[in-house]
Image (spheres, rainbow, N blue to C red):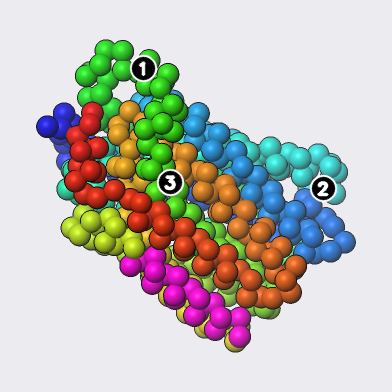
Amino acid sequence: MSTKPASSPAMLKKVVFASVLGNAFEWFDFVIYGMFAATIAKLYFPAGDPLASLSLTLATFGVGFAVRPLGGVLLGMYGDRMGRKRALSVTIILMAVGTGMIGLLPTYAAIGLAAPILIMVARMIQGLSAGGEFSGATTMLIEFAPSDRRGFFGSFQMCSQALSISCGAAVAWLLTSQLNTVQFESWGWRLPFLFGVLVGPVGWLIRSKIDESPEFLALARANSRGARRIARTTLSELFSHHSRAMLAAIGICVVGTVSSYVFNFFVPIFARQQLGIPATEANLSTFLSTAIVVALCPFTGHLSDRYGRKSVLLPGIVCYGVTAWLLFHHFVAAPSFISLLTMQAGVSFFMSFIWGPAPVALTEIFPVEVRSTGAALAYNFSAMIFGGLAPFTNTWLVKVTGSNLAPIYYVEFSVLLGIVGTCLFPGAARLNATARAV
């Protein structure tokens, strides 16, 4: 029998608000770097070849992901030891510091080589924060949620990520359409980063008003030495007793993270640089398509509560792979705002069937004592290898192969890994046993 205590409806609402809004603030800070990659390339990574300059910027974008597994382990273990609430407070302060640095740093023309180095340091601070945010916010959501509605409440995690990307694209569209080139490059691009500094005090205040996770408190009460025991055994337990869960979680994470960082970040840059689509149109298309994910994720999360995680994830991944293949080919053959929007919108529709059930799938697969660390490792390892480096890798693939179709093969490889991961996902009976293991 589960020892999870019931949480009040009022506190559940507070937790959803704190997790979703705080997570959206954090991811807005993290993703706007990608939205302004072309401008940052020009100001901080000057090079004779514009493509080489952009590649350096996108590689620095990936640096934020390189440290995410470290942030995930450190903040995940901290959350498993000291509580989910404390870990979430640390992540939000770190993100504010890294974002503020980017918004205030002088350019290469002003301070020379120190500029790209300090940009890299700021991205690393952001990466440490983002590494702990996903698992912390998601774990908090599903541990407060009723057991039969975890998919629905967990989906709000991805709603907040999609919302942050959509808002970032809207801000980019607004700035690029209203400011001239000189205004935008001199001060306009800094505004979202300076606004993002507010994430620290505002997010901390919001999250200070919520209770600690009831499942974490139940675990601590069940074993008076629980926190110390967990701190010693988390990593060894993960790799010795939960290896299949880790592989399943990584596979699901790979297809989800590639879908985001290819179609929401790389494709707008690719559309501008390679296919001549105006920046305003690329940003508008990204804004509209990510709004679809925001709207559909709660529905697909609910479907996973009713029909099971695999029953939603597997057909969603397959349909996403087929749709991406067909619409990407069409876009490259006939580039225009309409074909770009059609591709991003069509892909976003089926992405929602991956993103909605993914948060609950990646957390409930692990028992409470290793949940935050397990979800953080799986998510951040996948994001580091396949997500953060996706814009850089695909830019390189296009340059080396000379083919604008190269990125779709990267996408389809991630689809294959996602199908394998979903097939490794345990059945409902085993998941129910895991949920009761407190």
What residue is disc 1 on? 229
Quarter of the N terminus within the rendering: top left
Give above or below for 55 relative to 287: above
Please name the amino acid that badge 3 sits on: Leu
Instruction: State the SS at label 3.
Output: helix
Q: Please state which of residues 73 and 401 is positioned toward the viewer in this rendering.
A: 401
- The residue positioned farthest toward the right in the image shown: 48
**Residue 164 shows in the view:** no
Q: Which of marks 2 and 1 is in front?
A: 1
**How much space separates mark 2 and mark 3, taking CA atoms?**
42 Å
Instruction: State the SS at label 1.
Output: helix
What residue is disc 2 on? 108
Q: In this view, does 155 lie to the left or right of 135?
A: left
Q: Please state which of residues 239 and 179 is positioned toward the viewer in this rendering.
A: 239
Q: Residue at x 24, y 37 (%)?
A: 434
Instruction: State the SS at label 2.
Output: helix
Residue 406, image x, y percentages: 64, 71
Q: Does the magenta stretch include residue 330?
A: yes
**How much space separates mark 2 and mark 1, taking CA atoms?**
49 Å
- The residue positioned farthest toward the top in the image shown: 224
Q: How many marks?
A: 3
Q: In this view, does 241 lie to the left or right of 417?
A: left
What is the quadrant of residue 401 in the picture?
A: bottom right
Q: Nearer the viewer, mark 3 or mark 1?
A: 3
Mark 1 crowd level (few <14, some 14–19, many ≥20, 10 Å Cα): few
Please provide the residue range marked out in magenta: 315-333
Q: In this view, does 296 lie to the left or right of 264?
A: left
Residue 226, image x, y percentages: 31, 17
Which label number is shown at residue 276? Answer: none
